[in-house]
Image: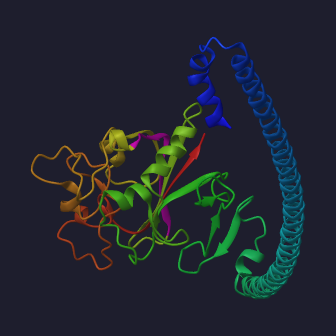
Amino acid sequence: MTFLLIFLSMFLPSLLASNDPAHDIKILKLQMKVLVKLQAETNQKLVLTNQRLTKLKQETNQNLTDGNKLLNQMAIQTDLKLTKLEKGVNQNLTRGNNELSSKLIQSSQVLEQKLTQHFARTNQAMNQKLTKTSQEVLKLKTKEQTLNRFCNSKPNACGSCYCIEDFNIADKYFCDCRSKPVKRDCKEHHVQGGWTLFQRRVDGTTNFYRNWKPYKEGFGQLQHEHWLGNDYLHLLTTQAVLTGSEMRFELGIKDRSYKNYAKYSSFHVDSESNAYQLHIKGYSGNIGGTEPSLAHHNKRKFTTPDFDNDDWSGGNCARDRRGAFWFGGCAWINPNGAYDDYKQASDVLYSFSWHPFWLQSSEMKVRRK
């Protein structure tokens, strides 16, 4: 049919040019017939095309519907899987929390048990130590009551201080002022009381030929031979700076059956920065001999074998006299010199002495006025 239309369009003008009306009409009728038939075929094709488009649209809609259903099913299945997974995770978390809580409770119980056992053992050990200490204190009290009969017979011998018996010293006891700032032998019973003993020598068992540090800090046994310490001596005299301090020697001279004393109404010791310089004056006493011997030592600095602060240009007085003291050049007394029980030194000044006497014992004490 398409070929016929092409043919008519190409040759119809030539066919109609024959000047024959009948022939032209016949040709036109033929052309119209062809056109009608062509229109009918075109309409039929359009109907078929529309039917195909409708069917394709229906199939497309159906595919879309099926796709949506599939997506919905997949979404539902995914939600179900997620819900199931979330439930499993929550169950695992709950189970983990329960297990952790159980372990924490078990650990706390174990720790509490161990701590209870430890505290019980510690408490038992402390009770045992306390019991043992109490027993030892009881034994010491019993021993003190047994051995310290001399002090028990003199309940007021030391006033506010503690009486301790010692038969190695002349008085047979000494007073320990434990409650004082410096632990020291307090002569509360002697010459109106209040004395602090800072030097004692009785038998030569303690070496007094020592360097600067021991004399600074103190040495010996408090109840026997000792030097209290220059730092403490400075503190004691400094605390009494407003009222002042006084000082007293108690001396046992060889071949004498009684003690002598020398007392000074003013006594002060400077700090270490000034080499513990001595300030002393106001003598009274019954020592005799070359007195006032200690006046020679006034305003002298302390000298030890390793610290030479004396006025002797030819050497060190502490080394020469075998004992530390407030030397000038060098000394008339030597209370810290070598203990010479048999007078073997070539001169009295080279031993434990107060010129011109050889000493058997000595005590040096200080108190606030």
**Residue sitting at 69 percent across and 20 percent down?**
23
- Residue 46 lies, in percent from the top left, at 80, 37
User: Which quadrant would residue 299 be assigned to in this image?
Assistant: top left
Q: How many marks?
A: 0
What colour scheme has been applied to the protein in the rendered image? rainbow
Look at the image and tell me in which quarter the N terminus lies: top right
The span picked out in magenta is 258-271
Residue 316 lies left or right of residue 51; in this view the side is left
**Residue sitting at 20 percent across and 47 percent down?**
329
- Residue 103 lies, in percent from the top left, at 82, 79
Residue 278 among those drawn in magenta: no
- Residue 82 lies, in percent from the top left, at 85, 63
Look at the image and tell me in which quarter the C terminus lies: top right
Compare residues 304 and 5 and report the one nearer the observer.
Answer: 5
Residue 228 lies, with reference to residue 233, above or below; the image says: below
**Residue lying furthest top in this view?**
19
**Residue sitting at 30 percent across and 42 percent down?**
300
Would residue 335 be seen by someone viewing this image from the given angle? no
- Residue 119 lies, in percent from the top left, at 81, 80
Compare residues 120 and 329 and report the one nearer the observer.
Answer: 120
Compare residues 104 and 154 and report the one nearer the observer.
Answer: 104
Q: Main secondary structure of the magenta part?
A: strand
Residue 345 lies, with reference to residue 36, above or below; the image says: below
